[in-house]
Image (cartoon, rainbow, N blue to C red):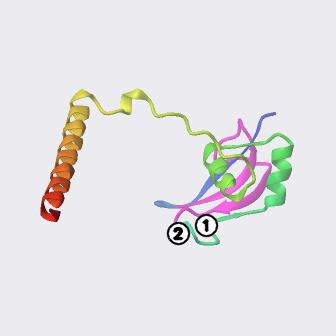
């Protein structure tokens, strides 16, 4: 049985609140779970103490038993030092700027470089 540590959504429309649960990977997102190990409220500021409330001992126990956290929870757990920080893969080439956009970026850089050189030359001329 594949066990995952994942988020189970609660809260009202446009006001999400999540329970951090240990569940069978085949169970539905908001369905049956094995154990609740905490809560996550994304509506609170990032530095708020109640944004992520978890029982670290239970999480460590489940991870030692082979439970795998989802990508989102792996990032949150990495901030707490419970798991290694997940590797974020490189973005696909499809999202990279196209040829014309790259030309515009190069032109902008060249103009900025020329302006910086002109300002430096002007500063030298005024210093003499």
Foreground residue among 101 and 69: 101
Disc ID at residue 121? none
Whether residue 32 is visible: yes
Q: Is residue 101 magenta?
A: no
> What residue does disc 2 label?
45
* Residue 12: x %, y % from top left: 52, 62
Disc 2 to disc 1, C-alpha distance:
7 Å
Whether residue 30 is visible: no
Asked which secondary structure carries label 2, the reply is: loop
Foreground residue among 40 and 45: 45
Q: Is residue 31 magenta?
A: yes
Q: Which residues are magenta?
A: 16-43
Q: Residues within 10 Å of mark 1 (few under 14, many from 20)?
A: some
Asked which secondary structure carries label 1, the reply is: loop
Q: Find out whether the residues at labels 2 and 1 contact each other: C-beta distance under 8 Å.
A: yes
* Residue 54: x %, y % from top left: 73, 62
16 vs 123, left or right, is right
* Residue 126: x %, y % from top left: 13, 63
80 vs 115, left or right, is right
Q: Quadrant of the N terminus?
A: top right
* Residue 25: x %, y % from top left: 72, 37
> What residue does disc 1 label?
51
Instruction: Please give the name of the residue rendered at 66% of the width and 46% of the height, measured from the top-left corner.
Output: 85
Instruction: Please give the name of the residue rendered at 55% of the width and 62% of the height, measured from the top-left corner.
Output: 42
């Amino acid at each position: 049985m594949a066990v995952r540590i994942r988020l189970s959504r609660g809260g009202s429309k446009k006001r999400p609140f999540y329970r951090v649960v240990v569940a069978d990977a085949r169970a539905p997102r908001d369905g049956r779970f094995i154990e609740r190990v905490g809560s996550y409220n994304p509506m609170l500021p990032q530095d708020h103490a109640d944004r992520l409330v978890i029982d670290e001992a239970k999480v460590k126990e489940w991870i030692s038993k082979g439970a795998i956290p989802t990508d989102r929870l792996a990032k949150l757990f990495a901030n707490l030092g419970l798991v290694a920080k997940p590797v974020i893969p490189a973005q696909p080439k499809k999202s990279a700027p196209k040829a014309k956009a790259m030309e515009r970026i190069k032109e902008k850089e060249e103009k900025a470089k020329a302006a910086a050189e002109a300002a430096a030359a002007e500063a030298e001329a005024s210093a003499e």
